[in-house]
Image (spheres, helix red, strand yellow):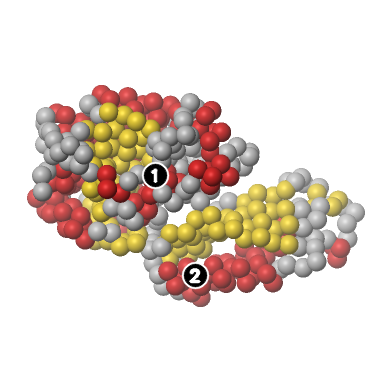
């Protein structure tokens, strides 16, 4: 049975309402009021399709359909539901909706799986509130301890446990998932690039995911009056930061083989028009398909920063995230391709230049990731869009694969 396009569109429209920036894209930060609204909707739909719902100690949402085999590991399907500021309606939610639709199809077809089916909605993949990214999946994999989360704070100094309590979540619950309880994880995501649309292919079966790291750089100088401090006596943190940032693209170019660097976030203190900045904090995102390139660039970035340190300028560099390049499970990839072939849906092999929760969870279970086309390759912007029939095609492939994985073996 094919997925219900009308139902998929209803879910997309419903989740798109929960944004802090109406008519200016989706802004749904983790543990915000919009998070709570989306969370309530997701849980209500999971329950409507017969799933038993729970939240863990980070607020990741699980909806479970028990299997005939008692104590058997689950096949988990889903993605994240947070967003970047002024992002789109599809990056993340499309994969959550895929899981919800698969649960609906299991219910409509009265399928009693041998292995449990779980649908998951993951928090803070983007890292827009607490930095680093992939926080929900890293917690599930056991890479974040409770003490780490107590120290992790947003730009307003609010810690993860404090933010959770503000929307009624319980940070004392267990987060780390025993790998023995997971048989496989399946994720669908919009491509966020132009290849599938340009080649008129419905599904990309992801073979590997780029490695990435994120640095947080703090440049400290000395504040002063903009009019009375001579230029040769200034310790301007922003000028030093700007000089450093200007050199980063060339580092990536020289490293080659698709290596990229991005400075996507910065804060200036005290941020007054007539005050010399005494502190600048900025992020550096580094990605490559080869771990060697990532390590090389990290060192080169640190070397550049050191050249700008002086008596008046000091710098610190913290690594908030590090993920190795990942190759995804070959057997799951084969099953995804077989499902596409059986359904008559076109597919191609792909590499992901973006990080996904799938890359984290691949450390603890077998993982499959597919892409569906993005209009004009756009993402992380209000114009982000994928046709409903393209979402449905991807969901059909995941559904057929989930059917196989939840059967007795």
x then y, percent, for residue 260: 48, 65
Q: Residue at x 65, y 49 (%)?
A: 267
Looking at the image, residue 235 sits to the left or right of residue 212; the answer is: right
Task: Name the residue beneath numbered marker 2.
Answer: 295
Residue 15: x percent and y percent? 38, 31
Q: Secondary structure at mark 1?
A: loop
What's the residue at 38%, 40% (across, down)?
A: 122
In what element is the residue under mark 2? Answer: helix
Residue sitting at x 53%, y 36%: 161
Q: Position of residue 278 (x, y in %)?
A: 76, 53
Find disc 1 in the rendering and name its residue. 176
* Of 376 and 292, the residue lying toward us: 292
Where 249 falls versus 45 (above or below)? Answer: below
Q: Residue furthest right?
A: 228
Quarter of the view holding residue 49: top left
Most distant residue in the bottom direction: 254
Residue 79 seen in render:
yes
Circle 1: is it few (<14), some (14-19), or many (20+) Cα within 10 Å?
some
Q: Is residue 184 left or right of residue 155?
A: left
């Amino acid at each position: 049975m094919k997925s219900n396009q009308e139902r998929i569109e209803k879910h997309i429209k419903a989740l798109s309402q929960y944004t802090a920036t109406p008519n200016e894209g989706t802004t749904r930060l983790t543990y915000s009021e919009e998070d709570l609204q989306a969370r309530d909707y997701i849980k209500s739909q999971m329950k409507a399709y017969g799933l038993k719902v729970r939240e863990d100690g980070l607020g990741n949402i699980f909806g479970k359909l028990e299997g005939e085999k008692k104590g058997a590991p689950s096949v988990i399907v889903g993605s994240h539901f947070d967003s970047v500021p002024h992002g789109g309606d599809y990056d993340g939610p499309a994969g959550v909706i895929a899981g919800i639709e698969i649960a609906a199809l299991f219910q409509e077809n009265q399928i009693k799986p041998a292995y449990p089916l779980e649908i998951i909605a993951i928090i803070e993949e983007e890292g827009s509130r607490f930095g680093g990214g992939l926080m929900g999946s890293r917690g599930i994999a056991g890479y974040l301890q409770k003490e780490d989360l107590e120290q992790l704070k947003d730009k307003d100094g609010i810690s993860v446990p404090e933010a959770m309590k503000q929307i009624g979540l319980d940070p004392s619950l267990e987060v780390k998932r025993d790998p023995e309880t997971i048989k496989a994880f399946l994720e669908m995501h919009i491509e966020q690039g132009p290849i599938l649309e340009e080649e008129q292919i419905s599904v990309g079966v992801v073979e590997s995911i780029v490695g990435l790291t994120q640095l947080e750089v703090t440049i400290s100088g000395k504040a002063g009056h903009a009019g009375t401090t001579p230029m040769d006596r200034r310790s301007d943190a922003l000028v030093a930061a700007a000089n450093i940032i200007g050199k980063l693209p060339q580092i990536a170019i020289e490293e080659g083989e698709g290596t990229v660097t991005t400075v996507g976030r910065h804060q200036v203190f005290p941020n007054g028009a007539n005050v010399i900045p005494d502190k600048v904090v900025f992020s550096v995102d580094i990605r490559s398909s080869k771990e060697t390139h990532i390590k090389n660039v990290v060192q080169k970035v640190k070397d550049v920063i050191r050249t700008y340190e002086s008596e008046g300028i000091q710098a610190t560099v913290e690594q908030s995230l590090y993920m190795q390049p990942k190759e995804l499970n070959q057997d799951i990839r084969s099953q995804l391709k077989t499902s596409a072939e059986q359904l008559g849906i076109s597919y191609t092999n792909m590499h992901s230049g973006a990080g996904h929760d799938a890359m984290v969870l691949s450390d603890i279970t077998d993982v499959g990731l597919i892409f569906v086309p993005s209009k004009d390759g756009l993402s992380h912007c209000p114009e982000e869009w994928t046709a409903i029939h393209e979402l449905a095609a991807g969901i059909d492939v995941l559904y057929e694969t989930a059917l196989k994985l939840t059967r007795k073996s």
